[in-house]
């Protein structure tokens, strides 16, 4: 026999689905396009689709210029053309439909923190496309990014995975350099997530800029001066923003090991979707983290 529906506040919420005719979510991916970058972006949009069935999610590359890696501008134009053709076909079939008001697409930057140069590039692509599109904020700061940083550090053996500290890790760092790109604004924003990470790990965390000469070395010196002996570099990056060699050079400059960038951690897809639904006024459950074990 089927179980009866539970009344009141204990009733399971109805699953959220994308509204009919909703704008596309277009993920704006920075950096030089590559198969690795595409795989990462595809995993992020796959997570978003799994959270919101029926979601039209697409990928546009800031430096894309061909069919394999389409530019953000080209993706926006193609999305608008498809939307118009779809409604024209429906009207030709005798259906009483009209083009929905609002944007054709909601563009979500695949960025953990603000980067003025990359955001200007995104805005330029939106303007040149002449498509009605809305641009959201970057993904951070957010507690889920602190969780993701914790996971990446623990995967590299640079932090204790258990928040209750029921066991030790010989290589666990006692000071974390949170490496961002985007100058002073990015460092300040990373510092907010850094405070959340420091609360998780109970060790000092300081943000530094990968794109400012001497920033990484200066923060490393400050941490060591305050008593930290074993440092670790935690990239506050999704991955495509900079070349991997720059992270390696930064770790060498600080004299420490480094964790991997955030990559397609599940929280990234959930945060991208949250930016999209907020822009549309949809109110799904807020993305929840998972305990780090």
Image: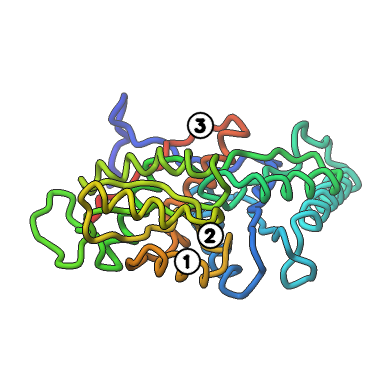
Secondary structure at numbered mark 1: helix
Label 1, on which residue?
Answer: 247
Residue at 75% from the left image edge and 41% from the top image edge: 133
Quadrant holding the C terminus: bottom left
Give me the C-alpha separation between circle 1 and circle 3.
37 Å
Residue at 31% from the left image edge and 27% from the top image edge: 7
**Residue 73 place in picture, x, y as percent:** 79, 54
**Residue 4 place in picture, x, y as percent:** 30, 37
Give me the C-alpha separation between circle 3 and circle 2.
20 Å
Residue 59 found in image quarter: bottom right
Please tell me the numbered disc located at residue 182.
none
Give me the C-alpha separation between circle 2 and circle 1.
27 Å
Label 3, on which residue?
Answer: 283
Residue at 82% from the left image edge and 48% from the top image edge: 80
Residue at 83% from the left image edge and 52% from the top image edge: 77
Please tell me the numbered disc located at residue 46.
2
- Please state which of the two labelled residues, at mark 1 or mark 3, is closer to the viewer: 1
Q: Rate crowding at label 1 as few (under 14), some (14 to 19) or many (20 or more) other CA atoms within 10 Å.
A: many
């Amino acid at each position: 026999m089927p179980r009866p529906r539970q009344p009141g506040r204990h009733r399971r919420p109805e699953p959220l689905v994308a509204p009919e005719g909703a704008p596309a979510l277009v993920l704006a991916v920075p950096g030089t396009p590559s198969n690795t970058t595409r795989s990462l972006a595809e995993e992020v949009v796959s997570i978003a689709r799994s959270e919101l069935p029926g979601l039209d999610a697409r990928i546009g590359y800031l430096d894309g210029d061909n069919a394999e890696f389409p530019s953000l501008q080209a993706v926006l134009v193609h999305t608008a053309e498809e939307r118009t053709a779809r409604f024209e076909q429906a009207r030709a079939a005798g259906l009483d439909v009209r083009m929905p008001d609002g944007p054709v697409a909601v563009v979500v930057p695949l960025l953990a923190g603000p980067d003025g140069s990359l955001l200007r590039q995104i805005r330029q692509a939106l303007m040149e496309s002449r498509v009605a599109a809305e641009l959201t904020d970057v993904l951070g700061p957010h507690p889920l990014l602190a969780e993701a940083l914790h996971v990446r550090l623990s995967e590299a053996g640079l932090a204790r995975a258990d928040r209750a500290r029921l066991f030790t890790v010989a290589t666990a760092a006692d000071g974390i350099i949170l490496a961002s790109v985007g100058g002073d604004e990015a460092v300040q924003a990373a510092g907010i997530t850094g405070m959340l990470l420091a609360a998780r790990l109970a060790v000092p965390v300081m943000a530094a800029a990968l794109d400012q000469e001497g920033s990484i070395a200066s923060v490393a010196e400050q941490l060591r001066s305050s008593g930290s002996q074993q440092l670790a570099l935690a990239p506050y990056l999704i991955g495509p923003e900079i070349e991997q060699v720059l992270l390696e050079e930064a770790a060498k400059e600080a004299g420490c090991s480094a964790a991997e960038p955030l990559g397609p951690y599940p929280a990234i897809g959930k945060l991208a979707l949250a930016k999209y639904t907020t822009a549309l006024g949809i109110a799904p459950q807020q993305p929840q983290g998972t305990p780090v074990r």
